[in-house]
Image (cartoon, grey):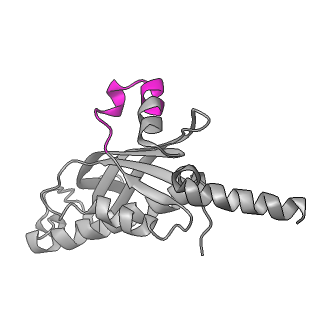
Amino acid sequence: MSYRSVLVIVILAVMFLFPGLASAQNDIIVSLKSPACPWSDNELEEKVDMLLTSMNRATIIRRTLPTSTSAMSFEDMVLWGQQQGGRYLVDVTIDRIDLEQRKVTLIPWVIFRYRVYAVMEGTLRIIDLKKGRLIDLKHIECDVKASDKWQIVDDDKTDADLMVPADEKPLLFDELEERAAAWLYQEIKKLTRGNHLDG
């Protein structure tokens, strides 16, 4: 029996006897905190999880950091993540989910344009627990346009046409969650590249 054959058998035996040893290198710990939104079903976490399950050779571990990231040092976050058993720690903190009005002045005092958006803001932090270093820290900023109104002279931000009907808000914020989840998935997949292979 060749040396290579023996080596393959040993590696397979180790993987069989200690499956956790191999899988730990593919574990991505995801902690997501988000304020409740009165206009949505608050399913951002579920939407993100559903997308992340498509990442082959990567086990997703759902955990929640014991306290806000602003109250934890980087070293504490690394230690906590290592205690959970994984290669990467993905910390998603959503700070704001709201309706926002934006104004564009096309001709001063004459023509205005108001737009209303559903907005979501927060931070995405990804840590390599094996190396104990921050891979990236990104600002989360997603929006979906709800209404759009041109005005001549009036400049009235309370225009009834700018109000989003109550029955349309759940669909609007569901679309916002879908967009945010898709963005988070792409960023997590990109920044943990090498830890998984997509089929």
* Relative vertical location of residue 176 with respect to residue 17 in this rendering, above or below: below
At which x and y percent is residue 35? 21, 47
Q: Is residue 106 one of those drawn in magenta?
A: no
At which x and y percent is residue 60? 44, 57
Residue 113 visible (yes or no):
no
Residue depicted at x 58% and y 61%: 16
The residue closer to the viewer here, 106 or 139, is 139
The quadrant in which the C terminus is found is bottom right
At which x and y percent is residue 78? 48, 32
Q: Residue 6 is drawn in which quadrant? A: bottom right
Q: Is residue 70 one of those drawn in magenta?
A: yes
Instruction: Give the residues in magenta.
Output: 64-78
The quadrant in which the N terminus is found is bottom right
Residue 70 in the figure: left or right of residue 124: left
**Residue extending farthest right:** 2
* Relative vertical location of residue 75 with respect to residue 177 in this rendering, above or below: above
Residue 90 in the figure: left or right of residue 4: left
The residue closer to the viewer here, 152 or 164, is 164
* Relative vertical location of residue 31 with respect to residue 78 in this rendering, above or below: below
Q: Residue 64 is drawn in which quadrant? A: top left
Residue depicted at x 10% and y 74%: 167
At which x and y percent is residue 126? 50, 43
Residue 37 visible (yes or no):
yes
The residue closer to the viewer here, 142 or 91, is 91
Residue depicted at x 47% and y 61%: 185
Residue 154 in the figure: left or right of residue 190: left
Looking at the rendered structure, the number of numbered marks drawn on it comes to: 0
